[in-house]
Image (tube, rainbow, N blue to C red):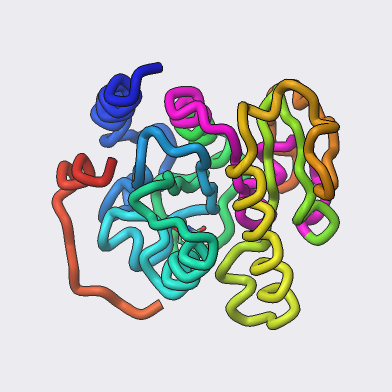
Amino acid sequence: MENNIKRERLKEFYFKIKDCQLCELYKSRTNFVFGSGNANSPVIFIGEAPGKNEDIQGKPFVGQAGRLLDELLFSIELERSEIFIANILKCRPPGNRDPRIEEINICKNHLFKQIEIIDPKLLCTMGKFSTQLIINTSAGITGLRGKIFMVNSRAVLPINHPAAALYTPSRMVVLREDFQKIKKVLGMKGKLTDGIENIEDLEVVDYSSSGSTLRAGGDESSISQNKDEQLGLF
Ligand code: URA
């Protein structure tokens, strides 16, 4: 798809869903957090749900975990403006509680549409929730992280959630290592669909998901933004 066509389609989709009321979370949100970045990104980073700062600013990963994400991107010579970041849930669960399965099963369709439009080479799932959703498993993140899963002909790399790594040094170590794998995958030519055996020294699991139905389950910012300012984000 031509570059600006993806951007236009993403914009159109944003307008379609920005006032979403499909679950109860709209009642307590400040902003609908669509996601941000480049509509032509070769990778989508997928988190869990907006937290307090994200709800206030209307952008994903703007708190402490976001600063770590920026630093990790920098370590592989990427910037936010080059990639796309989204969450499974577009509205903050009150008190930052875990997303509920019924919320995920509603909101996942927004995410799937974003994936369809951007059509990236790689999905990088951050933490348990997005990993379990995308590769359709109830297995824990510890056994999955760092491996490449081929799901419906697309590469998926689960990594630890940056927020979890902030408090657990051992998770931080492997998170940094896993970022180097992102660099490796993005550096490969083609879409990885021609033969996963071409991916040297990366552990690859051929895993065809039948439809991603979930089985398992900062500091305050004063910047407030009008919802339509999100258009500038992609
Ligand atoms: N954690 C997430 O999963 N997403 C955000 O946007 C922020 C923190």
Q: Quadrant of residue 164?
A: bottom right
Up/down of 78 relative to 151, above or below: below
* Image coordinates for residue 5, horizontal then vertical, percent: 30, 20
Up/down of 18 relative to 95, above or below: above
Q: Is residue 30 left or right of residue 49?
A: left
Between 48 and 72, the one lying in front of the other is 72
Residue drawn 61% across and 27% down? 190
Viewer can see residue 95: no
Does the magenta run of residues contain 163?
no
Residue drawn 19% across and 73% down? 222
* Image coordinates for residue 19, horizontal then vertical, percent: 26, 35
Between 226 and 197, the one lying in front of the other is 197
Viewer can see residue 41: yes
Between 164 and 49, the one lying in front of the other is 164
* Image coordinates for residue 23, horizontal then vertical, percent: 44, 38
Between 117 and 102, the one lying in front of the other is 117
Locate the C terminus and report the quarter of the image it occupies: top left
Q: Is residue 226 left or right of residue 220?
A: left
Residue drawn 71% across and 75% down? 173
Question: Which stretch did the figure color magenta?
Answer: 112-141
* Image coordinates for residue 42, horizontal then vertical, percent: 50, 37
How many numbered marks, from 0 up? 0
Does the magenta run of residues contain 119?
yes
Up/down of 47 relative to 221, above or below: above
Query: Which residue occupies the extreme top position in the image?
Result: 1
Residue drawn 56% across and 40% down? 104
Up/down of 40 relative to 233, above or below: above
Locate the N terminus and report the quarter of the image it occupies: top left
Q: Quadrant of residue 41?
A: top left
